[in-house]
Amino acid sequence: MVSQYQVIGNSAPRVEGIDKVTGKALYTADFSPPGTIWGKALHSPYAHARILSIDTTAAKALPGVHAVITGRDVAGGMYGRAIKDIPVLALDRVRFFGERIAAVAADDEDIAQRALDLIEIEYEELPAVFDPLEALEPSAPVLHDGASAYQGMKLPEGAPPNAYSVIKVDRGDIEAGFAEADVIVENTYHLPRVHQVYLEPQSVLIWLDGERVQVWTCSKAPYNTREALATAAQIPEESVVFNPTLIGGDFGGKATPSDLPICYFLARASGRPVRMILDYTEELMAANPRHEVVVQLKSGVKHDGTLTARQVRFLVNSGAYAGYKPAGIIRGSNQAAGPYKIANTRLEGINVYTNTVPGGHMRAPGEPQAFFAVECHTDEVAKAIGMDPLQFRLLTLVEEGEETAFGEVLQDVLAKQTLMAAAEAAGYYSPKAPNVGRGIGIGDRPPGGGQGTADVTLRPDGTVLLTTGVFEQGSGTYTTFRQVISEELQIDPERVEIEVQNTDYVKMDSGLGGSRGTRIYTTAAYDAAQAAKTELIGLASRQLEWPEDKIAYAGDEVRRTDTGESVRWADLLARSGDTVSGRGHIQDSARPHFTSFTAQIAEVSVDPETGEVKLLSFTTAHDVGKIINPISHQGQINGGVMQGIGYALMEELRVEDGRVTTLSLGDYKVPTIRDIPPMKTVLVQSESGVGPYQIKGIGETPIGPVAPAIANAVADAIGVRVRDLPVTAEKVFQALKEAKA
């Protein structure tokens, strides 16, 4: 089929790529107004303790120190993205190991650290709770006894201690469904915390410039983060300006206020611009990792493969605070039911406070945890009735017009087609060597919603300016903008310049995240281009005295459709000495009635003597709409799969008695290119999607099913199952040992 597009659908280099690889790109740490000093925070050595006294006398007397602040100095400011439950600095007690208690601004980082070492604090250690199940017990210490007063908090009635969010959804008759089953399978799965491991750590620079608060920080959602800072500082939101910087990796973790409020109060106290940059020990100890989750699954099934009932309990260890998450919670109970036909379901999602590092967002929040549980469980259900896992899925996956286990009816459902494409590419039924296994994982995710704005300006020199408030976090959004404008204006992409504005640009922009970037900003850019063309045609009509309804835009020209006369629009603008602009704005937060399926198949070998797992090959199939930039699209797939492999086989932010023990990237292992096996990508094309190009999201879908595909392959290879990640050699060896016993 011949493409109707000239630019859309072709691979394009990154707009900012040359600057990044040559070192010209500017990140937060590269900005330094005159007089900038360093800020650092002091972290709690206890998971739960009352602060009895703080003596900052010696720290304040140290030469080179400009400000020392504690919770008493920040007026009890509270912040968070939706739920404002995080104190700027701990006031009366600390709730996790690593919580910020005091902060210093000094001439350099070394002096700031020496000042922190001079602060004397007296604590009274309190009983702590680390396990989310234990946190729900009536005897558990209550972490937030005044939680109902937090801005944005809506506590559920009758909830157990520390459960600040309980969501329950019932469909059908769960008890009748289990009674109808021939076999009932019940399992519990444990998913650990993992860190986003972005190359650029959390960093911020704040300068109080007269009545304006100038901010540079690595936030992909600057408008939302601005509100959180203004709330904590108790200042008008319009007084805060977030200035554009590039972001050195995100993966979900760069939309939180982090140290922003502390930095603001240090700048106010010192009268100087202040920068704060976390080191990686602080990142791993006190940032916002992916959540620990416990998933309890119970399914009823008939011998013919019909699923009669499924009960899900999705227990999220939120850590000490909820404020790092956009809605205060992560979901996952609905995904833990899977994209399967089940008449009777009971889904329960509980978010729980514990005395551990607060969790935040990481690529596809809640979904890797949910998909691991439900896809491993699916294999175990299939085994219980003696059915092949692939055949069982083909029998039970939802189809067009059918309700999912969550009660949703989707359009253009390509679950089975995507699974079969993966199976065929992977040679699922081909012969295997001893101790070699193949495993399946499947999941889905619709593109996210939000609001965004773009302005397009045609200039007399023939170039085009695209203006945006998006802070690029690495997903290639600026390149997408350029491709859309180039396509719609029928000009060379090199003639499109990208200009990034600060947060004075518009009232609100959702920023990047949630697989919304391409959905939202292709539409905004497309509409801006059409609006600019309309304005240009109006200008041509006025200047040339042509009938407006007889003028068409044609690349570099405006042309009369009746006579064929044409004029270069650059010449038209040069004569008028003016530019022509158009704005596109979209506000669409509704969940689409379609989704994008991912099916993945892993092939592994397992050494039965040591438990060592080797990933031999990996196949990933994706249900896609129109792909804007194929090389970027494939990059998202590769990156998501690589992160999924880390989640499956090696990554874990270990916490013992509330203390993170993996405090360096020497202890916290992430995969390198040597850990990535040969990979096949299969794209299942469809005509469904959103926006002018019918697109589907790709940023988050590749990561979710990776871990269960690998765990299922291990079980297929040696007949034992590991139900908690990561699937290490030690766990496999222990499972083999127990199986023999």
Image (cartoon, rainbow, N blue to C red):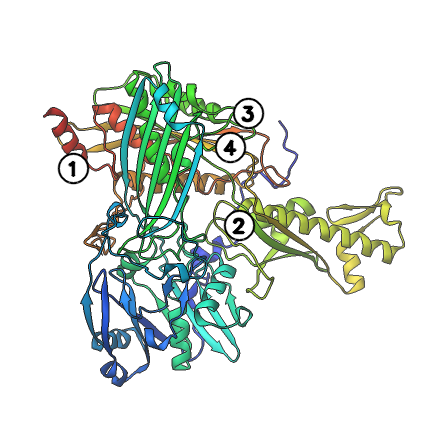
Near-viewer residue (287 or 676) = 287
The quadrant of the picture occupied by the N terminus is top right
Q: Earlier in the sequence, mark 3 or mark 4?
A: 3
Q: Are marks 3 and 4 in contact (CB under 8 Å)?
A: no
Q: CA distance from mark 3 to mark 1?
A: 45 Å
Q: Residue furthest top?
A: 304
The quadrant of the picture occupied by the C terminus is top left
* Crowd class of label 1 (few under 14; some 14 to 19; many from 20; radius 10 Å): few
* Amino acid on which disc 2 is placed: Thr
Q: Position of residue 267 (x, y in %)?
A: 41, 77
Q: CA distance from mark 3 to mark 4?
A: 10 Å
Report which residue position mark 1 lands on.
Answer: 730
Vertical placement of residue 394 versus 538, above or below: above
Q: CA distance from mark 4 to mark 2?
A: 30 Å
**Figure quadrant of residue 76:** bottom left
Q: CA distance from mark 2 to mark 1?
A: 42 Å
Q: Earlier in the sequence, mark 2 or mark 1?
A: 2
Report which residue position mark 2 lands on.
Answer: 477
- Which residue is drawn at the image coordinates 38% and 81% (left, top)? 270
Report which residue position mark 4 lands on.
Answer: 408
Front tag of 4 and 1? 4
Q: Are marks 4 and 2 in contact (CB under 8 Å)?
A: no
Q: Earlier in the sequence, mark 4 or mark 1?
A: 4
* Crowd class of label 2 (few under 14; some 14 to 19; many from 20; radius 10 Å): many
* Amino acid on which disc 1 is placed: Glu
Report which residue position mark 3 lands on.
Answer: 401
Q: Is residue 229 left or right of residue 586?
A: left
Find numbered disc 2 in the image and state the secondary structure of the residue it sits on.
helix
Q: Earlier in the sequence, mark 3 or mark 2?
A: 3
Q: CA distance from mark 4 to mark 1?
A: 40 Å
Vertical placement of residue 697 versus 717, above or below: below
Q: Residue furthest front?
A: 158
